[in-house]
Image (cartoon, helix red, strand yellow):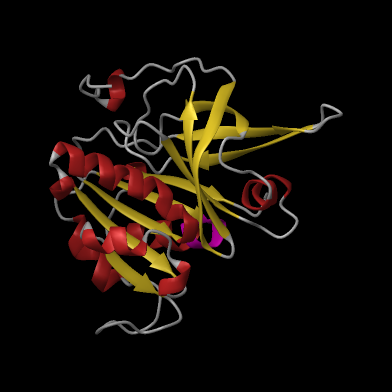
Amino acid sequence: MTDAPLPIEEVQAVETAWTTGIVIEKAQPTDDLVQLRVHVQDRIRHRPGQHYLIRLRAPDDYTAQRSYSVASDDDDPLVEFLVERLPDGEVSSHLYDVVEVGDELEVRGPIGRWFTWDTTTPAVVLVGGTGVVPAVAMLRTARRLGRTDLLRVVAVGRSPDHLPYRAELAKAGASLAYTRVSADTRAAGAPTADEVRPLLEGVELAYVCGSARFASYAETLLVDCGMPVEGIRVERFGPTG
């Protein structure tokens, strides 16, 4: 996995197939988040911003699958996922409560082309909650390539305890915003135009990832700050579990 990444315009869609992922590491950083690091057989290199499908199969062959963004850099020997356990979520609850190290999962990926960072284009990344995962992959890739100057990340959570990868994001230079508590010199609240507008100077793309409510707010905020609509790429998710 040492080939230089191609510009996004030159990337061709890659056919992926279901394969086996073996859980090598499992952590539960909070009572509703599980972090899985998985060895994927016949792995295809991924770009920051892509995702995988994880499929569960019951003894009667009933299946359920969900999509999860990749947090790891492509040079990481394992593929890392962060999953939020949702109430009555049949896949997320199983991954949190049942799956153990050594278990095998059905996985397919990497998937997605539009919401990927080409590692060369200056970009703003505005993410909320577990939507920080693709931003983590982008920052890890940028750090490996020595191009963290290309990314300006704003990560939003209700409080420090509700912002995954908080310490890593802060260390990488991301701006952290909490909507319900004040921190340092910043008052509680969503990111404002005064905070985001300066980050857009020299930027060609903006990535937004989070809940439908967050994504709608962030997209409107970026447009109000002068970001062209065609330069905004949005990935929103709902409580499908």
* Residue pictured at 12% horizontal, 41% vertical: 146
Q: Is residue 154 above or below residue 177?
A: above
Residue visible at 25% across and 39% down in the picture: 141
Q: Is residue 120 above or below residue 237?
A: above
Rendered image quadrant of residue 137: top left
Q: Main secondary structure of the magenta part?
A: helix
The x and y percentages for residue 101 are 56, 41
The residue segment tinted magenta is 211-215
The reply to whether residue 225 is in sight is no
Residue 134 location, x and y as percent?
39, 45
Q: Is residue 6 above or below residue 166?
A: above
Residue 61 coordinates in the image, percent (x, y): 82, 26
Number of callouts in the render? 0
Instruction: Identify the image quadrant of the N terminus.
Output: top left
Which of the 4 image quarters holds residue 55? top right
| Residue positioned most to the right | 60
Specify whether residue 103 is in view: yes
Residue 214 falls inside the magenta stretch: yes
Q: Is residue 3 magenta?
A: no
Up/down of 167 relative to 82, above or below: below
Left or right: 53 in relation to 230: right
Q: Toward the viewer: 173 or 10?
A: 173
Viewer-proximal residue among 214 and 224: 214
Say which of 95 and 91 sits in front: 95
The residue positioned 41% from the left and 29% from the top of the image is: 113
Left or right? Give the position of 114 relative to 89. left
Where's residue 103, x and y in %? 61, 35
